[in-house]
Image: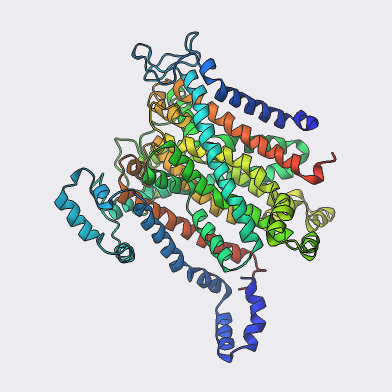
Amino acid sequence: MIEATKGGGAARAALPSLRGLRAIWHLIPRPLRIILARVALIPMQLFGVLLVTFVLVRLLPGDPALLLLGNMATPDAIAALRQRLGLDQSVWIQFMHYLINVLHGDLGTSIFTSHPVTQDLLERAPATLELITYAMILTVVLGVGLAILSVAGRRYGFDRLTRLYGLAAGALPDFWVGLLLIFFFFHIAGWAPAPFGRLDTYLTPPNTITGFYTIDSLLTGNWADLGSAISRLALPVITISLVNAGAMMKMTQTVFANVYDSSFVQHARACGMPESRIVAMSLKNSMPPIITTAGFLFGFLLGAAVIVETIFSWGGLGQYAVQAVINSDYPALQGFVMVAAIVVLLVYLVVDVLYELVDPRIRI
Amino acid sequence: MRTWLMRPGAAFGAALLLLQVIAIVFAGLLAPYSPTTADPLHTLMPPSASHLLGTDVYGMDILSRIIYATRINLLVSITAVAGAFAIGVPLGLIIGFYSGIPSAIVMRLFDFIQSFPVFVLGMALVSVLGQEIWNVALVLAILFVPVFARLVRAEVLSLRQRPFISAARCSGATDRSIMFRHILPNAMTPALVQLSISVGMAILLTAGLSFIGAGVRMPTPEWGLMVSSGAQQLILGVWWVSLFPGIAIVLAVLCFALLGDELRILLDPRRRHR
């Protein structure tokens, strides 16, 4: 977007209509301009995602019809499905058909659950989103907090401790950490509930408003559900955060240290500004890269959710994807990969917009 | 080199690497039992003198399986990363040297591959290609190519502007000799550091894929699979089946992370005189 300022002079010298357009463009408030410029890229990116998910199933060795039907494959059924999927037509026409189906919300039928994949995914999405949201919050708080502690507390040797944590967190497999936490907090200490699902089995889920059990039960005043949902969220959220906060910390540390040691902060310190204000000031100025890192983190957390959901029988998208892998349920897997990619795209969109919003130097 | 080994991180990393090499080469001598033979009479035995780390649900000796698994886990991870390095480095060199539309397209392609969550894409690709160990290596190699290509490209872009390249060009050097003799040796450092770190990441990904059932299958000795085979018993208090292979993963990843960190320090010319 920085190139836009360079291009400005050239455009002004060019066609008057282009100049008019540019003038109108600059009448739009800056935040809206940032959002519009980003949203314009979305259709192209979505096209790319769909191309990949289409190619993914085309990579399958052998006849997709045979694989999609699995055990139900009779010659008649194969021929019918081949015709329905348009497999007798060219690859491009098949891709067009796939695009049209997806745009109509039709992701095929899961072989394992025999429900439409769209329905399966929608049912399970809130569970995963709730898990990832809380994990994301804890990871960012933990990562950024430790980074600040290590940089601002250098003279007390905190940086050595955090470096050790960073090394350890980077080497910990999330599935193993989850299992160990279950062992210690459920089996030995007895503090955590059994790792089976989002709610104690004797409770009925709160009425669906947002799909987040914690928020729904809070809104409906269902305190038993709230307590149970929180206690069941604790271990999976801690597992994901413990493993991923290390990476968050390392990235933040570099950025934060650069600002913390910069001359304008030293000047502020020399003027006698209290340490707490200095830390707050440095943090504010390191925000843009931290936001980007947090966005990247989301993709990792989605991967971590796949594993952690399996361990805690979470019943979300991740567990659905693992079942799809184990049962060779390709329509379900294809649908999951598509949804995961789209969610990550949307997160990157939000991150890019936030980045440009908090950095007033970026012209658009 | 000697002073470098005095650093605790480097010494610990090197010691761990040596341990793994020994486990790979002498697995047959070190392992007290066969890694794949079930023993129905001795299932889920806690650690004892006869089975130092206990036995799993099938009665297989956990220590022996951990030792043999070093071969699979390390060979898969190293092969994958070496493959990605062999493709990524020349690719990064070319797209850094010739900036044009083809290079821009390759970069957008990398952006795109990297915008998918690594684990999700890896899981889907392995599942589609077939759940075999070499497919895991292939998929990991594909996923790591952009990492190396990007690092080398960034170095090449800054090196291309330097006077010694112009000098080489003036003295009549061809593009090819400039790229391989003048730029490449100077652009390798970040990729070399990343090489070690990537092996650690590949070990974690391989183990994670096997854990969810998208990698190797029983009875192949593999760390992630071993952790997963003990997951159900862990809730009942049988801790040794999952604990020990997990420690093996942590140590292996730690080893390559430490070596990567220390390699960065060793290869950094500003630190060389200290």
Q: Quadrant of residue A94?
A: bottom left
Q: What residue appears at the point 53 percent right and 57 percent down from the top-left corner?
A: B110
| Percent x, y of residue B51 | 47, 12
- Residue A276 percent coordinates (x, y): 72, 49
Q: Residue at x 71, y 39 (%)?
A: B263
Residue A207 shows in the view: no
Residue B2, compared with residue B89, is above or below; it is: above
Q: Can see residue A245?
A: yes
B151 displayed left or right of A84: right
Classify A3 as above or below B110.
below
Residue at 66%, 44% (x, y): give it.
Answer: B192
Front one among B264 and A311: B264
- Residue farthest to the left? A76
Where residue B200 appears, as percent x and y from the top left, is 58, 37
Image position, residue B34 (x, y; %): 44, 17
Which quadrant is the C terminus of chain B positioned in?
A: top right
Q: Residue furthest bottom?
A: A16
> In the figure, residue A11 lies in which quadrant?
bottom right
In this rendering, would A137 be left or right of B218? Answer: right
Tell me, what colour scheme is on the image? Answer: rainbow
**Which residue corresponds to the image point at 48% horizontal and 69% vertical from the top-left?**
A39
